[in-house]
Amino acid sequence: MKTSKSIYLFFLPGLFLYAIFFVYPTISALFYSFTDWDGLSSSFQFVGIENYERAFTGDTIFRKTIGNNLKFMLVVVVFQTIVALAFALIVLKNTKTTIFLRALYFFPTILSSVSVAFIWSFIYDPSLGILNQLLELIGLEFLAQNWLGNANIAIYSLAITQIWFHAGQMLIIFVAGLQAIPEELYEVAKIEGASKWQTFRNVTWPLLAPSATIVVAYTTIQSFKAFDLVFAMTGGGPNNSTEIVATYIFDIAFRSYQFGYASAISVIFMVIIAVITYLQFKVLRSNRISY
Amino acid sequence: MKRSLLLTSGLLSGALLLTGCAGESNSGTEGEEDRTKISFIHWRGEDKAVLDDLIAQFEEENPAVSVEMTIYPSEQYQATGQRLLQDGSTGDVFTSFPGAQFEAIASAGLFEDLSGEDFVSNFDKELISVGQKDGAQLALPYQLVFNMPVYNKGMFEELGLEVPKSWSEFQTMADTLLENDITPIAFPGADIGPNQFMNSMMMNNAPDEDVFEKLQNGEESLTNEWWVKTLEDFQLLEQKSYIQKDALGTSQDSAMAMVANEEAAMLATGSYHMSALLDLNPDLELDLMAPITVEENEAMYEGINTATFMLAVNSKSEKKEQAKEFIAFLSQPEIASQYANETGQHLTINDVEYESEVLQNTAYWIDERKTRFQPRFLITNAQIEAAVLSSIENVLGGAEPMEAAKEAQQIVDENRD
C-alpha cells in the first residue's frame, strides 16, 4: 500500500510544538553553557568549557547535589516500586472494595505538589506535627525526629513524601500489567505445584517486566526532577542536605544570575539522567520473557 | 480526492494552531485606548488590598493613566519578574530587593536614574542610600523594617527583666526565662530564621560594615574571629536551650504560635511580624530587642534596619513619565501614611503619621537607636550568602563552629567573583 506524501503534514503541528518547547530550549541551553550570560544582560562572552570545568572540579555544592539526588533516587525507586507492586497485588481483582482502594491510593497523585508539600511540612513539624505526636501517643517517642531539620535524615523524609505522592500512579501501571498476564499460566503453575513465591518469581515478575521497566524509568526521571516538593518543603536546607540538582540549577540561574553556568549544569544533568535511564532499560529488558 | 482531503486537513490543523497562538497575544485592552496603562509588579501579596485602594485614588487623580498591578510570590518574583523587565512591556514601575537582586538589575541597566526627580526629597535621605549606585538614585526603598527579634515586653515586665545590654546579661535573662518554663527565643530555623537572626547576632561581632564586601574580594575570611565568634554564639544558644528544641525543623508559623501562646519570649524574625503576632494574640505588648553579643562598652549597634521594597522605573519602559507620576503619588506623606497604617510597616517617607499603637511604640527605633543596615543584604553574591547561612545551619545541626566556618569558606573561595 502506498502512503500519500501529504500524510506527513499531520506531523507538522506536533513537530512544531516539539521544536519550540524542546529542541530550541535544549539547543539554547547547550549554546549558553559555553557563555558567561547572566540571564539579564543583552551581551555575554564565550568562555569555552570553563563552566564544565567549574562543575567538575570547582564546585563542592554541585557534587553534593549529585550525591543527594542519587540517595533520593535510590530510596524512591526501590521503595516506590515495592510499595506500588505490593498494593497492586492487593487490589488486583475487580471488586467494589479494590476499585475504591485503587482510587484512594491514586488520590495523592491528583493533588498539586505545593499542597502535598504543605501537608507533609505540617506532618513533619517537630512540635505541632502529627507524626511525632502519633509516635508519642503509641509509646514510640524515641522514634520522634526533627524530620526536615536534621541534615542526616531530611533527604529521606522528602523521599517518603515523594513515594506517598506518586506510588498510586505506579500502582495503576502495575495493575494494568498484572491484569494482562493470562490466567492459564497461573493454573499451570498451580497444577505443577508451584509455591506462591515460585509463581511470583517465575510467572508474575518476568511477565510484568515491561510494566516494571516503565515504572522504574519513570520513577527515576521523576525523582531526579522533584524540584517542587524539595523547593517548597526545605528549600535545599538545612546546610544543603536536601539540595538536589534541579533546585541548585534554580539557585544558580535565578538567585545568582549565572545562566551560563546553570545551563552547563543542566546539560550535565540531562546526560546523567539519560545514562541512568539507558542502563535501567538495558538491565530490565534483559529480564523480559514471553511464554 | 483522498489526497486533497489529507492536504486540506493538514493545512487546517496548522492554521488552527497558528490562529490559537495569535489569539493569545490579542487579548486585553478593549475600551481603554484613551488611557495609558502602566504595569506595576512586586511581591507583597499581603499589601494587595491597600494598594488596590491607593491605585484607585491615583487613577481618580490621574484619569489619563491606569495601573495594572501584578503580584508574584517573592521566589517567583526573583525568578520571572525581573526577566519580564527586559523588553519594557511589563513592570513600568517595579520593586527590587536590596543586595544581590539590586546589583543584578543595575548591572543589566534596567533601572531608570531617578536622581533629579522632585519626589526623591519626600524620602529620608539616609535610608534611601541603599538604592544608589555610582552616584545615581536607581531605586527608592519604600519600607523600613527592623530585622531583629520581637519580644514580649509585658512578659519581661512581669518577670522583672530588663533589656540586656551585654552578652552576659543576655544569658542571665535567658536563664531566668528558662527557670520560668519559657523558651527564650522561638527560632524558625526551617525557613527565615537563619537569614534574619544572623544580622543581629553578628552586628557587634563584626562592626565593620564592609566586612562582607571584604569577604567577597578575599580580604576577609569566615574562619576569622568575627564569624567564628558568631557561630560560637549560635552554638551556645542551641546548647543552653535558649532556642527551642529541633529549631532547624521549625517553621515561621510554628515559631509565631510559640510567641503568641507565650511559650516563648522572643521571635527571631523582625518588626514585620508584629501585626501578625497581635492578630494571633491581641493582649501581647511587643517591642524589639537585638542580642548584644559583646560586653556593653564594646557594643556599637543596638539593632538592624532594612530599607526595602525598592520602587523603581524600568529603563526600557515607554511610559516612564507616567511611571514616575505613580511613584510621586506613593511618596506623598498622606498616601504613605495610609499604606503604613494599613500594612503595619514603617516607611522611609518623611512626615508619615503612624496611627497604630505598635508602629507608634516602635517608631523610636527609627531616630533614637543606633541601628545598622542589614549585613546580609551587603552580600551581593547569592552563593556566598548561601554559604554563610549554611554555616549557621551546620552549627545548629551539631558541627563545631570552626569546622562549619572552614566548610563555608571553601564555598566562598569557589564562588568569589
Image: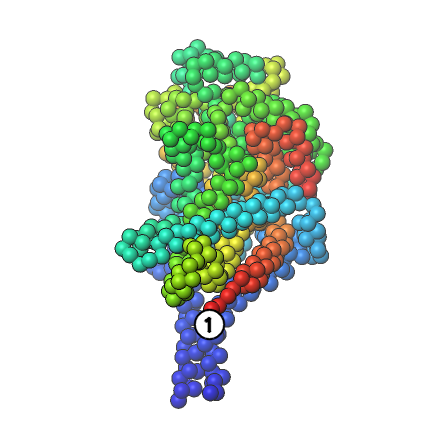
Left or right relative to B375: residue A290: left
Q: Is residue A257 left or right of residue B254?
A: right
**Residue tagged 1:** A13
Of residues B309 and A59, the one nearer the viewer is A59
Which residue is painted at 45% across and 13% down in the image? B179
Dot 1: within a 10 Å radius of its alpha carbon, few (fewer than 14), some, or many (20 or more) residues?
some
* Residue under the point 36% across and 50% down: A105
Residue, far left? A96
The amino acid sitting under disc 1 is Pro
Task: Tell me residue A259's x, y (percent).
Answer: 60, 52
Does residue B324 appear anywhere in the picture? no
> Foreground: B166 or B233?
B233
Q: Which of the 4 image quarters holds residue B204? A: top right
- Secondary element under disc 1, as helix, strand or loop, is helix
- Check the image and report above or below for B227 versus A216: above
Residue at point 39%, 51% (across, down): A87
- Tell me residue A284's x, y (percent): 54, 60
> Which chain does the residue under circle 1 lie in?
A
Q: Quadrant of residue B222?
A: top right
